[in-house]
Image: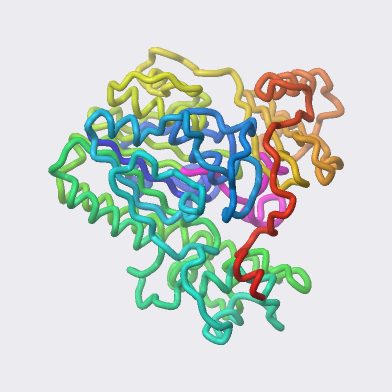
Amino acid sequence: MNLIVICLDTFRADMVGPGHKFSFVETPNLDDFAAQSVVFDRAFGEGQPTLQIRRAFFTGRRSFPWRYNFDRRGHWHHAPGWHKIPPDQDTLAEILLQRGYLTGMVADCYHMFKPTMNFWRGCASYEFIRGQESDNWKCGSPSLVEDQMKRHVREPINWKRHATLYQYLLNQRFRQSEDDYQCARVFRTAADWLESAANFGPFFLWVDSFDPHEPWDPPQAYADKYAPGYSGRDFIFPGAAWENGPPSDEEIERIKALYFGEVTLVDHWVGHLFEKLDELKLWDDTIVMVTCDHGTHINDHGGFGKGGGNMRPYNTQLIWFVRHPDGPRGKHINAFVQSHDLMPTCLDLLDVPYVTDGESAWPLVTGAKQKLRDEIVIGWANWADGRAAGFASVRDDDWAYTTAVGGAPHLADFVPKLYHLPTDPGEDQNVAEQHPDIVARCRRSIEAVIGAPLPGTFEEVCDRQAPAPGCYLLQKRL
């Protein structure tokens, strides 16, 4: 069997398939794929966001709690867990390479390719598609993108504040058509890789699209599909809409439309890769998975973006669809699974024995197991005051609990949250004070994972001199 894993950044779990909050968003290729796949309806990260979850994907090891303090020189930002894969942890690509697989990666998630990173370890070939977000790729004077900046931020332009957007617009100056957009380049390159590798056999390909992560910058027609007739600014980085006052209702609806359009764009180009699988007749001997690293706010409970202070499912839940040539089709699994279960599941399906922190989820599909765990513990890294800190949550069938961890001063005022899911599925009413016994139980679960009393301390120390989020080199220049 061949193996392809497609990872989509910032893709909400309530987009694909019928009956979800955002099922109206057009995702025909992923809808069809999910209908042909095993769908894990309660997949969550174990450590988030971006790099932490990919490390768990690649190694099957928990990335939370944050235990390491590797060299990060030249690598911004410095949030807990934002570091390379430890040298003593085997990657999925390394294991399969040693078993005779042709291993490859096509990705524009630029964090994996920063100095000191090694997320391509074990890939016989890899292609880094340049240009996402604040990837320091192209350079140039502000005058080159000033007109574009005016379409995305309020005036007068605060260039330093919007250094990430400035860098992104410089990176995208070459675009002439939809084929030049980031996700199009990723999936076209992945299709070319398959064209070259199809007859090598067996192969493993990891395809990583940073879209639909911000900036939400689809071709205009994709956004117009969800907010037609709009003529104002497109705040492709949503935070820019709140500069100098709150945005209008029309602007908020347009921001939502930008995300929806980006999702539909990604779906279209995922379909391009699926068409290549059709053309090469690979479906009969290739396991294909589609997953993501986390979701994002789309004006849920107000605002946009994501963060550990809000561990609701629209931030922490994952899509995870597994299409096996031998089926089953359209089977839904309701048991909890997590990001560090992906790697052992891949190896299990390929009959490769290996022991990790996670477990293969496939026995849930065959009926050999009814569940892997009664509850899940999730950590979310936070930019900290010189120490490893962030948030942790516990989720089971009935309760969802979130608290700050790590003891950083700026998190001291965070109020722990407890939601009773059967009566409050939207997680709107904090009932922590009414259920101290449940809170105590959840805290014990977190303490068991971190190996210390809450708020916990971690070996990892973040660089106190780390720059603020954004494009470091341009911030220095500006």
In the visual, does 277 lie left or right of 292? left
Residue at 25 percent across and 54 percent down: it is: 191
* Most common SS among magenta residues: loop
Q: Position of residue 133 (x, y in %)?
A: 53, 63
Q: Name the quadrant of the N terminus.
A: top left
Up the image or down, 333 lies above or below 303; here it is: above
Check the image and report above or below for 451 versus 202.
above
Taking depth in this image into account, of 61 and 242 the one nearest to the observer is 61
Q: Is residue 90 left or right of residue 350?
A: right
Quarter of the figure with residue 165:
bottom right
Residue drawn at (72%, 28%), measured in percent from left and top? 420
- x, y (%) of residue 126? 33, 50
Q: Quadrant of residue 134?
A: bottom right
**Image location (x, y in percent) of residue 239:** 67, 64
Q: Give percent across and percent down for residue 246.
A: 75, 68
Residue 164 seen in the figure: yes
Q: How many marks?
A: 0
Q: Report the front residue among 170 and 307.
A: 170
Give the residue at x 56% y 47%. 295
Give the residue at x 48% y 62%.
132
- Image quadrant holding the C terminus, namely bottom right
Left/right of residue 105 with respect to residue 158 in the rendered view:
left
As drawn, is 222 to the left or to the right of 423? left
Q: Nearer the viewer, residue 27 or 356?
A: 356
Q: Residue furthest left?
A: 199
Q: Is residue 305 magenta?
A: yes
* Residue numbers of the magenta segment: 292-311
Q: Is residue 254 visible?
A: no
Question: In the rendered view, would you say 153 is above or below 329?
Answer: below
In the foreground, 307 or 99: 99
Q: Is residue 207 magenta?
A: no
